[in-house]
Amino acid sequence: MNYRRVLFVSELGGDATVGVAMIRQVAPVAELLVVIARVGERKFAWFSGEAPGDLNEAVTASVDALRRSTTDAARSVEVKVASDLDAGTLAEIAAASEIDLVVVAGPLPLGVIAALAKLRKRRPVAVLWSTQAPLGNRPITDIRCEAIGSRARAAVAAFLRDHGDPPSAPPSCCSRRRCTIARPSSASPASRRRWSS
């Protein structure tokens, strides 16, 4: 895949290892990683100078730990903290940083999920979301896409065209990828197609 500019949305204090592992596999040569650490509004006040010292230190330590865990996931890493992530904020960050991939790991509040869906409608970014760490340490070479209808199949084809390695790319350890495109489970096995790049 040829992703170069990644936005990673995470909960502050959560385990970032799943997201970082996905980034390393899908965007192994990323130029920029923008990390948005979401903090609930009640906890966001802990960053102020008026917060008790131990609360402020705990939040600062969480930000530092997140910064350390993402340090080598891209050439340049920016960590930002946000109390509210709406579609407008995400779109603004994605546009300003020219993001081409959004990575989300673990569970998120419904409001953030809705904001990600709206972001996807506003900007041409791919969204990768998983709750499990990928197996191994090599780039992802096998994906499965569910395509409901011709518009969905066309979107998957455009995604593979825009983000897959071109056929003229020199061979590498990750030059063989396979994508299985399947219709909903009610479709017959004969309607399933396998594509390779």
Image (cartoon, helix red, strand yellow):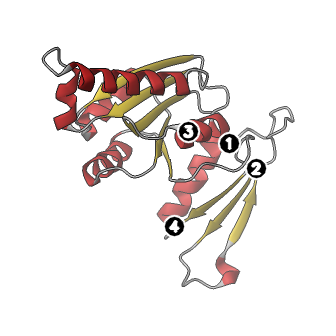
Name the element at disc 4.
helix
Distance, label 3 to label 2, CA atoms, is 24 Å
Q: State which tag comes first along the sequence, 1 or 3.
A: 3
Q: Residue furthest right?
A: 171
Task: From the top left corner, tell me how far across and down residue 93 is, in percent.
Answer: 34, 27
Name the element at disc 3.
helix
Callouts 1 and 2 close, C-beta under 8 Å: yes
Residue mark closest to the camera, 1 vs 3: 3
Query: Which residue is at 68% across, 42% downward?
Result: 164
Res 162 visible: yes
Q: Amino acid at mark 3?
A: Thr
Label 2 belongs to which residue? Answer: 177
Query: Which residue is at 56% across, 21% downward?
Result: 71
Distance, label 1 to label 3, CA atoms, is 25 Å
Relative height, residue 157 to residue 86 (above, below): below
Label 3 belongs to which residue? Answer: 17
Mark 1 is surrounded, within 10 Å at the Cα level, by few (under 14), some (14 to 19) or many (20 or more) other residues, namely some
Number of the label disc, if any, that sits on residue 150: 4
Distance, label 4 to label 1, CA atoms, is 20 Å
Distance, label 2 to label 4, CA atoms, is 23 Å
Q: Amino acid at mark 4?
A: Ser
- Residue 25: image quadrant is top right
Q: State which tag comes first along the sequence, 2 or 4.
A: 4
Q: Nearer the viewer, residue 139 or 182?
A: 139
Mark 3 is surrounded, within 10 Å at the Cα level, by few (under 14), some (14 to 19) or many (20 or more) other residues, namely some
